[in-house]
């Protein structure tokens, strides 16, 4: 495919029927992907004229068109545009006059992935046409150098341009190794509605700076405009709710003298590629209203370190995390050491997601902190994880509703007895609200718990056991469940535990070798936020 639409027309210049505009008045959403030969959305195919020389000349002109939307295409109501793996040099045709561009005034969402010929997205003269834009996502565009390009209309002006995105709430810039600047010249930008910002793997540009340090650097050091950071903290933070930071960004924030109210709206923070050994607890103090924390591809050996300088501070004023996600923390050995003063930071934790943390041996150690607010616990592909929690921690999980353990090949049991403990068969562990348990691709799992406790699951509805060949029984001690539990095995097979209960069902499935094999779950973007 070379174009989506081809419109017929006469080639003669004086033809009264020549098409001036091609309008798609009802089109609201357009998604194009994996179309390596497409260079035009709509092309006017001329009827060949009598003169061979003229015909060759016009065909050559048509073939050199490199923008997706030419000057004749009008999309007055297009709201969402998504382009993935498209080999185009430009998206829009534009002139050099700072006028409203007729094809984009309704656009609210623009997504660009793997467009590896794009060197810029907008021209300065057309940027006012995108005042309705609410979400801009640019990912893995390998040669992109600028977000807004300079054109003659702007070059002739002596004033410094100000680019305003009045309605933009979400901005994502990922995997742009050649991005050098937002705009190749002195400029200002305003983002009054920005709430979600993620800038990562943009190797040639510094994402953030303080307004004060930025002015000082420009005035005293003469730093070229192309090296100016994308954003100043003072301008983007007042309304920002969701932010992604690198380790260098974190250090800058902790070292900066920022007013406390500047970070007051921030609810979700992701820290990516931080080479520190311990998570910088200063963020919990600086972002005191933060509720969601994602840590990815960092070198942390422990998260809430009792040796941190913040140990002596009043941690009662730190952010109380409700959702914590840990991904690709290969050096992480534990979240905290037992009896740490900082345990209480997680007492309001509601959702915990952990994946690809290859040095982790046990997730939640023995602790004095209650996890009664935890409703979702999901762990995936932690190759050294032997146990999930100790029995003392399990007793505090009274609010847990969904439990998922996937691809942890070394895990032998989910709940293990406390050190030096002797399980009492009369001691009961009750998961009052637990409705769903998913156990998938756990090669070494022999049971949910091998200690001789009484387990009570009064709300259990679904138990999924797939790829657990060594699991011969669910629990060694007494087990109390509702009369009917849906036990899922294989690929979507169901066995209801009407007779004999869950333990008997697991024994039967094991004897029939129905718990062996592997699962398609292992290729998951696994089950989040059920």
Image (cartoon, rainbow, N blue to C red):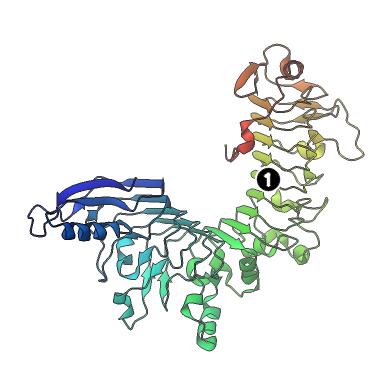
Q: In this image, 126 relative to 364: left or right?
A: left
Crowd tier of the residue under label 1, counting other residues whose Cα lies within 10 Å: few below 14, some 14–19, many 20 or above: many
Kindly identify the residue that appears in the image at 59 percent across and 23 percent down.
Answer: 492
Quadrant occupied by the N terminus = top left
Query: Is any atom of residue 197 visible in this view?
Result: no
Labels in figure, total: 1
How far across and down, in percent of the image, does residue 134 sit? 39, 56
The residue positioned farthest toward the bottom in the image shown: 220
Q: Quadrant of residue 428?
A: top right
**What element does badge 1 sit on?**
strand
Residue located beneath label 1 in the image: 354
* Front-most of residues 117 and 527: 117
Residue 480 versus residue 417 in the image, above or below: above
Q: In this image, 500 relative to 142: left or right?
A: right
Kindly identify the residue that appears in the image at 70 percent across and 59 percent down.
Answer: 316
How far across and down, in percent of the image, does residue 309 sit? 77, 67
Q: Quadrant of residue 517?
A: top right
* Front-most of residues 425 and 67: 67
Query: Is any atom of residue 417 visible in this view?
Result: yes
Kindly identify the residue that appears in the image at 73 percent across and 28 percent down.
Answer: 468
How far across and down, in percent of the image, does residue 343 sit? 76, 52
């Amino acid at each position: 495919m070379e174009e989506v639409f081809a419109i017929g027309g006469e080639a003669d210049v004086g033809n009264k029927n020549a098409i001036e505009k091609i309008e798609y008045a009802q089109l609201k959403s357009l998604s194009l992907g994996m179309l390596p030969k497409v260079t035009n959305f709509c092309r006017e195919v001329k009827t060949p004229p009598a003169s061979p020389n003229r015909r060759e000349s016009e065909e050559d002109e048509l073939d050199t068109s490199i923008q997706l939307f030419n000057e004749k295409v009008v999309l007055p109501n297009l709201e969402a545009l998504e382009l993935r793996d498209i080999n185009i040099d430009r998206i829009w045709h534009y002139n050099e006059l700072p006028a409203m561009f007729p094809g984009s005034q309704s656009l609210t969402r623009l997504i660009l992935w793997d467009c590896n010929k794009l060197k810029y997205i907008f021209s300065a003269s057309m940027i006012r046409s995108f005042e309705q834009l609410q979400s801009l996502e640019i990912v893995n565009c390998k040669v992109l150098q600028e977000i807004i390009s300079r054109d003659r209309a702007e070059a002739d002006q002596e004033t410094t341009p100000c680019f305003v995105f009045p309605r933009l709430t979400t901005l994502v810039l990922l995997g742009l190794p050649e991005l050098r600047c937002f705009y190749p010249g002195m400029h200002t930008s305003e983002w009054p509605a920005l709430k979600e910002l993620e800038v990562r793997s943009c190797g040639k540009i510094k994402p953030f700076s303080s307004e004060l340090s930025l002015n000082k650097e420009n005035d005293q050091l003469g730093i070229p405009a192309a090296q100016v950071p994308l954003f100043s903290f003072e301008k983007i933070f007042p309304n920002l709710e969701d932010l992604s930071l690198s380790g260098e960004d974190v250090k800058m924030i902790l070292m900066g003298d920022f007013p406390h109210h500047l970070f007051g709206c921030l609810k979700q923070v992701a820290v990516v590629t931080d080479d520190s050994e311990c998570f910088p607890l200063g963020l919990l103090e600086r972002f005191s209203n933060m509720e969601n924390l994602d840590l990815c591809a960092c070198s942390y050996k422990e998260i809430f370190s009792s040796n941190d300088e913040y140990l002596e501070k009043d941690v009662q004023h730190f952010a109380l995390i409700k959702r914590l996600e840990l991904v690709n923390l290969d050096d992480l050995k534990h979240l905290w050491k037992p009896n740490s003063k900082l345990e209480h930071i997680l007492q309001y934790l509601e959702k915990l997601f952990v994946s690809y943390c290859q040095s982790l041996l046990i997730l939640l150690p023995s602790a004095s902190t209650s996890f009664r607010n935890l409703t979702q616990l999901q762990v995936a592909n932690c190759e050294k994880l032997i146990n999930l929690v100790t029995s003392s921690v399990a007793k505090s999980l009274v609010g847990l509703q969904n439990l998922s353990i996937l691809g942890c090949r070394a895990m032998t049991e989910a709940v293990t007895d406390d050190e030096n403990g002797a399980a009492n068969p009369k001691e009961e562990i009750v998961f009052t609200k637990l409705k769903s348990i998913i156990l998938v691709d756990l090669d070494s799992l022999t049971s949910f718990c091998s200690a001789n406790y009484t387990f009570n699951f009064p709300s259990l509805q679904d138990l999924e056991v797939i790829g657990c060949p060594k699991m011969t029984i669910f629990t060694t001690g007494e087990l109390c469940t509702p009369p009917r539990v849906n036990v899922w095995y294989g690929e979507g097979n169901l066995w209801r535990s009407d007779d004999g209960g869950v333990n008997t069902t697991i024994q039967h499935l094991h004897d029939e070798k129905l718990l062996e094999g592997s699962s398609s779950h292992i290729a998951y973007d696994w089950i989040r936020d059920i």
